[in-house]
Amino acid sequence: MATQCRWRMEVQSSKSKSSFTSYIRSCSISSTTTTTTTTTTTNVAPCDHVIVFGGSSGIGLAIAKECARKKNSMKITILARNKNKLDDAKNDINKEVSSTGTTTKVEAISVSVSDYDALEKIAGQIAKKEDRIIIFNCAGISYTTEYDQIPIEVYEKLIQTNLIGSMYIARAFLPHMENGCLVFCSSAAGQVGMYGYTAYSPTKFALRGFAEALHAELIRDKPGVSIQCAFPVDTDTPGYKEETKMMPEITKILNATGGLARPEDTANVMINSAFAKNPNFQVYFNPIGWMLSNLTAGMSPVSNLGDAVAQVALSGLFRLICLFILNDWWITIRKFRGKEKDENKKKGDPKID
């Protein structure tokens, strides 16, 4: 979910001034870069091969670069569609490897997550069952505007890339994995439906459902492979910058409930969690993310006592907090939409020839 706190707030006066919700916002903004999922040295399992989809830019590239900075050698494979961007990303990652003095090897492969045959072929070539493999699926696209402004083909494209592409990756690579972790990158917009995300949110909500079902199947078939679903807040990436170009002003205002995270911070949270000996199913990134993950847990797997206690004991409190936030959002939407209608009336009806 987009959560930018630096946007110009021309219509700030339309927001509710509730001190309670302001406090919640300040907690989220001040700790956007806080790593809420931590691992100690003794809790980290060695990794032989890190595979990053969407590794040419954004969070995916940040993950690959952070892995390259690790002192233990491994293989890093980045995959994306654009070969030129992949080549540039590979060079950047190799610079990080050079600074560590390790023997880490970096490979870049051009592929679309929509091409299952290509994914299956690549999986057979690069994935070895004897390795501990960690796959980060950060490939995804967004289209943020009102539902009636979204072309029908855009809905289909987002579903194909964000959801079906993830299914293809799992289907192609899991037969070659016996030990490791498969991380799906959902979004805070996969926990909360918000104004402007009618094309994006459904794909991220569905991705969580797929991850939960897959987790259940792997308990029997591949107990050594963990499944994770990460819910990052807005991160300062090239993709996010493109997203904001069409983002409605209302969405920008509502998204001020959190801060804009650095790719490095988001990457570190995901890496620390995935490299753990017992990875959590849900990966969250700040206090608001922790609250949402526990409030929306439902029948999701839980692998640490702290989250289990929070889900049982604090759900009522979390729901109360969210009701205040929701009320603030609805007030903002009604006020701002009213101003938009008044401005449109002043302009007059468009002429139809």
Image (cartoon, rainbow, N blue to C red):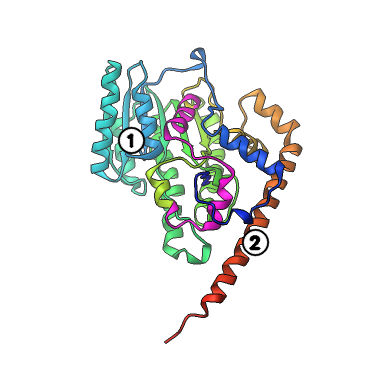
Residue 30, compared with residue 14, is above or below; it is above
Which residue does the numbered mark 2 point to in the structure image? 335
| Residue at the spot of label 1 | 123
The spot of residue 313 in percent (x, y) is: 75, 31
Q: Secondary structure at mark 2?
A: helix
Does 245 lie within the magenta span?
yes
Q: Residue at x 46, y 53 (%)?
A: 159
From the top left corner, tell me how far across and down residue 41 is, in percent: 48, 13
Which residues make up the magenta segment?
244-273
Give the vertical position of 149 relative to 113 (above or below): below
Residue plotted at (47% across, 38% down) = 184
- Lateral position of residue 300 relative to residue 312, left or right: left
Q: Which residue is nearer to you in this view: 219 or 340?
A: 340
Amino acid, disc 2: Lys
Assign a secondary structure to mark 1: helix
Percent x, y for residue 2? 51, 47
Query: Label 1 to label 2, Cα distance in Å?
Result: 52 Å
Q: In the rendered view, would you say 299 is above or below 205? A: above
Residue 129 in which image quadrant: top left
Residue found at the very far bottom of the displayed protein:
353
Residue at 54% x, 28% y is: 34
Q: Quadrant of residue 198?
A: bottom right
Amino acid type for the residue under numbered disc 1? Ala
